[in-house]
Image (tube, grey):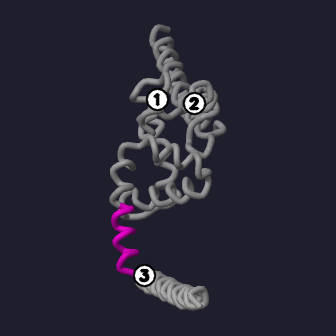
Amino acid sequence: MCYTLLVEIDRHKEKLADLCLNEQALSEKQRRLEPKTFTGFSKRKERIRQMTPSTLCPDNSEKLCSDMPVRSAQRRCKETLDPSEIIHRNSEGNKAALDGLWVMLANKCSEQQLHSYVEASPKMQKIIPMVVKTQTKGYEESHDNLIAVYEHEQLIATEKSLQDADIHYRLTQSDGLAELKSK
C-alpha cells in the first residue's frame, strides 16, 4: 500500500511539474500576444509614460529634464533610437538611424521649434560658427560672388560717371549763367 501511494505521489508531482511548465509557456505566449506599440513596450508602460512625458531642460536642449531619474531618461533616449535603427538598418553602426531621425526632425519641426532646440544646445553653439565660416568662405570663392562683385563695381563706376557728368553739366550751366549775368 505504501508503495502505491509513493508511486501515485510521484505521478502527481510529475503532473504538477508539467502543469508548471505549461503555465510558464502560456504566460510567455500571453506576453508575446499582449498588444504592443511600435517601439515594443506594452500598453501599461505607455500609460505610465504618458503620466511623465519627456521635456527638455531649458538651458540645455541635449538633455531630458523632468521628475524622472537619469537612468530612465537614458533608457528613453535609447528606446527612441532602437526602432530607428531597425527601420534604417545599416552596417555602419547607427549613422543611418541618425540620418533618418534628422530628416524626420528637419521636416516635422517648425522653424521656431528648431530655433529653440539649436539655441539651447551647447553642441550646436559650437558647430554653427564653423558652418557659417565654411559657407562664407565657399561663397567668397564662388562664381556667383565674383559676378556680384563685378556688377557692384560696374554700378559704382556707372554712378560715378553719372555724377561726374552731372557735375560737368552743372559747371557748364553755371558758367553760362555767370556769363549771362556779367553781360
Can residue 98 be seen here? yes
Q: CA distance from mark 2 to mark 3?
A: 53 Å
Q: According to the image, label 2 marks what residue?
A: 53
In percent of width and height, residue 145 lies at: 43, 80
Q: Residue at x 44, y 40 (%)?
A: 120
Dot 3 falls on a residue whose secondary structure is helix
Amino acid carrying label 1: it is Cys
In the picture as drawn, the residue positioned furthest to the top comes out as 2
Q: Which residue is mark 3?
A: 149
- Mark 1 secondary-structure assignment: loop
**Residue 137 lies in the magenta-colored region:** yes
Instruction: Tell me if residue 171 comes above or below residue 75 in the rendering.
Output: below
Q: Image check: 87 left or right of 33? A: left
In primary-sequence order, the first of circles 1 and 2 is: 2
Crowding near pointer 2: few (<14 within 10 Å), some, many (20+)? few
Do tag 2 and tag 3 residues touch (Cβ < 8 Å)?
no
Q: Nearer the viewer, residue 149 or 173?
A: 173
Say which residue appears at 63% left-offset and 28% top-offset. Answer: 47
Label 3 or label 1, whichever lies nearer to me, is: 3
Image: 39 above or below 143: above
Q: Which residues are magenta?
A: 131-144
Tell me the distance, in whole angstroms, between the alpha carbons under discs 3 and 1.
Answer: 50 Å
Residue 73 in the image: above or below residue 183: above
